[in-house]
Every structure is written in structure tokens, then in C-alpha cells.
Amino acid sequence: MQLLHTMIRVGDQEKSIKFYTEILGMKVLRQKDYPGGRFTNTFVGYGDETEHTVVELTYNWDTDEYTHGSGFGHLAFGVEDIYATCDAMRKMGVNICREPGSMKHGTTVIAFVEDPDGYKIELIEKKTL
């Protein structure tokens, strides 16, 4: 069994693609319009879908905004230098909603940023050996 992708609904397709590719460094792997359903699916990720879990950005043509509800938490990404990453993201206009620092009750260094739709993205500093 393999986790294939996670899907989030986005209000502005171009802003979301730009965030996930230019800010988080992913690549657009594939994109398809579904005129009958009035939506577009864009899959972004760091590598081929046969070996990597990816993110599906679903843009419903007639919906500009979504509520996140109380069930969704966040997406998590590992980074080498969390302080430099947050500084670079801040310069690109990304909202850093939790500055880098140790997580409560632990030593792992984390930060949280928001994508264009307000989804929380957790950055976790990778431990060096």
C-alpha cells in the first residue's frame, strides 16, 4: 500500500500553483480540466507519482473561497535550515504564522506558514547526523 496524494481545494489556481512551485519548490506533474464538472486538477510534487506522495490542487471554477472546517490540520515539509527558509519565504510575501522554534513539549524545531488559501504548512527542521 502507498499513500498517493492529498487533495486540497484552492480558490485561485494560479496563486496556489505559484506558491507550491516557487515557494515550496515543487513541480507541476500534471494538470487536467474537467469542463463537465467545472473543475481543474493540478498535481504538484517533488518527484514522480509512482515513488512520491503528491498534492492535488483542485480548483472548482465557480468557487472562490472555502472554509477549512475543524478536521483538517496541516501539510508538513522537512527543511534543512528552518530559519533561512522562513526568512526567504517572508521576503517572498509568505505569512509566517508561527515563527521557528522548538515545539511545545519537545526539541524538534518547527514553524508554520500559510498558503494563499490559508492552509497551514508546517516546516520541520531536519536533524543532521
Image: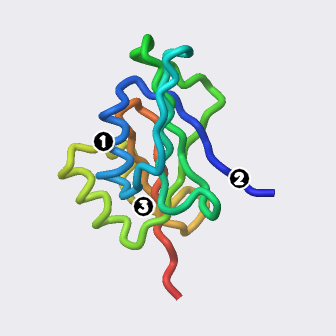
Q: Residue at x 44, y 28 (%)?
A: 10
Mark nearer the N terminus (1 vs 2): 2
Mark nearer the N terminus (2 vs 3): 2
Residue that protrudes farthest toward the right in the picture:
1
Task: Using the image, tell me which numbered label, if any, was put on residue 101.
Answer: 3
- The amino acid at mark 2 is Leu
Where's residue 4, x and y in %?
A: 67, 50
Mark nearer the N terminus (3 vs 1): 1
C-alpha gap between disc 3 and disc 1 = 16 Å
Residue that protrudes farthest toward the top in the picture:
62
Q: Is residue 129 above or below residue 69?
A: below
SS at circle 1: loop
Where's residue 89, x and y in %?
A: 27, 53
Circles 1, 2 touching at the beta carbon (< 8 Å): no
Question: Could you tell whether 69 is left or right of 118 in the image?
Answer: right
The residue that label 1 is drawn on is 95
How crowded pointer 3 is (Cα within 10 Å; few <14, some 14-19, many 20+) is rated as some
Task: Using the image, tell me which numbered label, if any, was put on residue 3.
Answer: 2
Q: Nearer the viewer, residue 42 or 93?
A: 42
Q: Nearer the viewer, residue 38 or 87?
A: 38
How crowded pointer 2 is (Cα within 10 Å; few <14, some 14-19, many 20+) is rated as few
- The amino acid at mark 3 is Gly
